[in-house]
């Protein structure tokens, strides 16, 4: 092989090599694929952030901004000794029931929680399906109801099913930014007004 051919060969190989380097995507090793900073394949150096709930007793907490419009507000105070909620012991209601809440400086439980959205359903003596007093063909007929109750709806009794205390020190930041249609919708809810809009 002539010297010029060798030189040409080397130049071509170098060009291909450079091109390969430029276009090759950055790689991430499998060990570092997780959200955590430590090796995905070993737990030895991995220590989770301690879950630390607010210790502020009710009355001293600062409420959280709502996560999105009409999202259930999160609990800004300690729930020590209040959970689990049982049929005989629901301390949440002792401060948050309307009529008491105002004097406790707590947000009153909203009207939506005193509404039954489930149609009252039973079988008539002759085996027909009766929903909200009307005979219907199928159980899927008439799915929602909007019945005002004097007492807290049973479906809302277990507050901590939807309202939860928040821990400090998150592993991953939540960057979600909600859009609120009204100026104070980030600190109060108006679900029942939305539901009843245009309803007479
Ligand atoms: C001793 C009275 C008391 C008890 C018991 C209590 N709370 Fe509260 N709660 C308050 C007060 C006062 C506030 C206002 C913020 C603060 O001071 O922490 C509040 C705030 C809240 C908020 C935030 C409301 C908003 O508008 O952002 C939620 C949600 C809440 N409490 C849920 C609960 C739940 C669920 C329970 C039961 C596990 C409970 N609370 C028990 C007094 C109480
Ligand atoms: C099935 C889920 C669910 C349960 C159970 C539930 N809530 Fe709510 N709560 C919500 C949602 C959703 C909202 C916001 C929309 C609305 O007003 O209905 C809310 C709103 C609230 C608010 C804010 C009202 C306002 O004017 O901004 C308070 C206070 C509250 N709930 C307290 C309670 C308490 C106390 C209990 C238990 C007795 C409870 N909730 C049970 C879902 C729930």
Image (cartoon, rainbow, N blue to C red):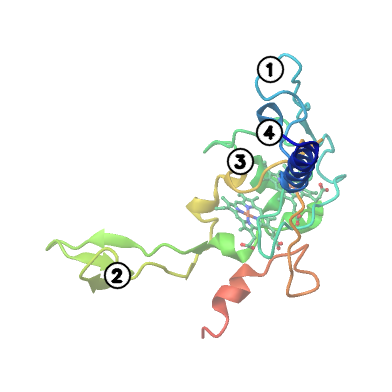
* Residue 42: image location, x then y, percent: 68, 17
Q: Nearer the viewer, mark 3 or mark 1?
A: 1
Badge 4 crowding class, 10 Å Cα cut-off, few under 14, some 14 to 19, many 20 or more, is: few
* Disc 3: CA contacts within 10 A as few (<14), some (14-19) or many (>=20): some
In the picture shown, does residue 152 fall above or below 12? below
Among the two numbered marks 3 and 2 on one chain, the one whose residue lies closer to the N terminus: 3
Instruction: Calculate the distance from the C-alpha at mark 3 to the C-alpha at mark 2.
Output: 35 Å
Q: Residue at x 59, y 70 (%)?
A: 192
Disc 1 secondary structure class: loop
Tags 1 and 4 touching, CB below 8 Å: no
Instruction: Give the residue number, with chain letter if any, for mark 1.
Output: 43
Please, is residue 92 above or below residue 97 in the view?
above
Point out the frontmost of discs 1 and 4: 4
Give the residue number, with chain letter if any, for mark 3.
Answer: 90
Q: Measure how far apart labels 4 and 3 are at the Cα level.
A: 40 Å
Secondary structure category for the residue under label 4: loop
- Quarter, ligand 2: bottom right
Q: Residue furthest left?
A: 126
Disc 1 from disc 4: Cα separation: 12 Å
Please tell me which residue lies in front, 138 or 60.
Answer: 138
Where is mark 4, residue-wise?
34
> Is residue 64 visible in this depiction of the protein?
yes
Does residue 65 lie above or below 197 as drawn? above
Give the CA separation, mark 2 to mark 1: 53 Å
Query: For the point 72% across and 13% down, which residue is it?
Result: 44
Q: Which residue is mark 2?
A: 141
Instruction: Confirm if mark 3 falls within 8 A of ligand 2.
Output: yes
SS at badge 2 = loop
Lower position in the chain sequence, tag 3 or tag 1: 1
């Amino acid at each position: 092989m002539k010297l010029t051919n060798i030189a040409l060969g080397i130049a071509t190989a170098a060009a291909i090599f450079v091109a390969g380097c430029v276009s090759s995507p950055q790689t991430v090793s499998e060990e570092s694929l997780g959200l955590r900073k430590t090796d995905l394949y070993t737990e030895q150096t991995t220590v989770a952030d301690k879950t630390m709930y607010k210790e502020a007793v009710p009355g001293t907490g600062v409420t959280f901004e709502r996560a999105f419009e009409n999202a259930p507000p999160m609990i800004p105070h300690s729930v020590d000794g209040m959970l689990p909620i049982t049929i005989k012991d629901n301390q949440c209601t002792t401060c948050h029931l309307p009529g008491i809440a105002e004097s406790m400086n707590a947000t009153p439980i909203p009207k939506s929680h005193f509404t039954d959205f489930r149609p009252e359903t039973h079988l008539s003596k002759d085996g027909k399906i009766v929903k909200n007093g009307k005979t219907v063909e199928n159980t899927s007929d008439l799915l929602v109801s909007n019945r005002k109750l004097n007492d807290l709806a049973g479906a809302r009794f277990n507050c901590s099913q939807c309202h939860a205390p928040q821990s400090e020190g998150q592993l991953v930041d939540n960057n979600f930014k909600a859009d609120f249609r009204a100026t104070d919708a980030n600190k109060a809810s108006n679900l029942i007004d939305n539901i009843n809009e245009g309803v007479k």
